Amino acid sequence: MTTTYIDLQIASDNKALPTEVQLESWASAAITAADTDTETSRDEAEISIRIVDTEEGAELNLQWRNKDYATNVLSFPSDLPPELNLPLLGDLVVCAPVVEREAKEQNKALEAHWAHMIIHGTLHLLGFDHIEDSEAEEMESLETAILAGLGYPDPYLET
């Protein structure tokens, strides 16, 4: 299993946040599951996670995706030259009020939804995407398997 280091920044007044240990374990599970090639698998990974409120989430989503609303998670993959061989994967920005609202609307346990968002964002940092249907199927299948391995239900089942 990959040792994952989290640089955690909390810029949210939300009280129902996961612990740094939870964030590390969820991100590490995603990295380990995605690293199927033993020759290129990583021993260490570093991710910056910034937990924000709606205003900052909306500002960042508008700036980077040209969408004028707060979204659950934004992923900013590292763009370092490969020859540097540093473990930095990139940055995740998670909007706590959106994650909490979605969990309630979808009748999901808040912890399970947080786990899904961190795993989803981490997979984006590793190059996974869901623009094409085939990519979405692969990514969703991997997310579901990772979450099941951690004891969480399938996030794509209707509740």
Image (cartoon, rainbow, N blue to C red):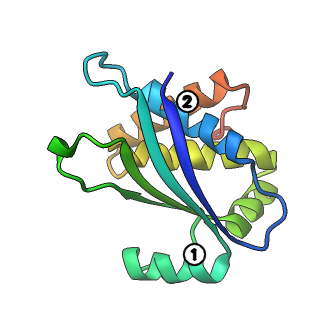
Q: Residues within 10 Å of mark 2 (few under 14, many from 20)?
A: many
At x 33% / y 24%, what residue is drawn? 41
Asked which secondary structure carries label 1, the reply is helix
- Give residue 81's mark: none
Q: Is residue 56 left or right of residue 153?
A: left
Q: Position of residue 69 (x, y in %)?
A: 56, 79
According to the picture, the residue beneath numbered tag 2 turns out to be 29
At x 31% / y 16%, what residue is drawn? 38
Q: Is residue 11 above or below residue 30?
A: below
* Residue 69 shows up from this direction: no
Label 2 sits on what residue type? Answer: Ala
Closer to us: 10 or 53 = 10
Asked which secondary structure carries label 2, the reply is helix
Q: Is residue 101 above or below residue 42?
A: below
At x 51% / y 83%, what residue is drawn? 59
Q: Is residue 145 above or below residue 20?
A: above
Examine the image and state in which quarter residue 135 appears: top left
At x 47% / y 26%, what residue is drawn? 32
Closer to us: 50 or 107 = 50
Label 1 sits on what residue type? Answer: Gly
Q: Quadrant of the C terminus?
A: top right
According to the picture, the residue beneath numbered tag 1 turns out to be 57
Q: Is residue 11 left or right of residue 142?
A: right
Q: Does label 2 or label 1 sit earlier along the sequence?
A: 2
Q: Is residue 90 above or below residue 126?
A: below
* Residue 109 shows up from this direction: yes
Q: Is residue 144 left or right of residue 123?
A: right
Q: Position of residue 73 (x, y in %)?
A: 55, 60
Q: CA distance from mark 2 to mark 1?
A: 25 Å
Q: Position of residue 114 (x, y in %)?
A: 69, 49
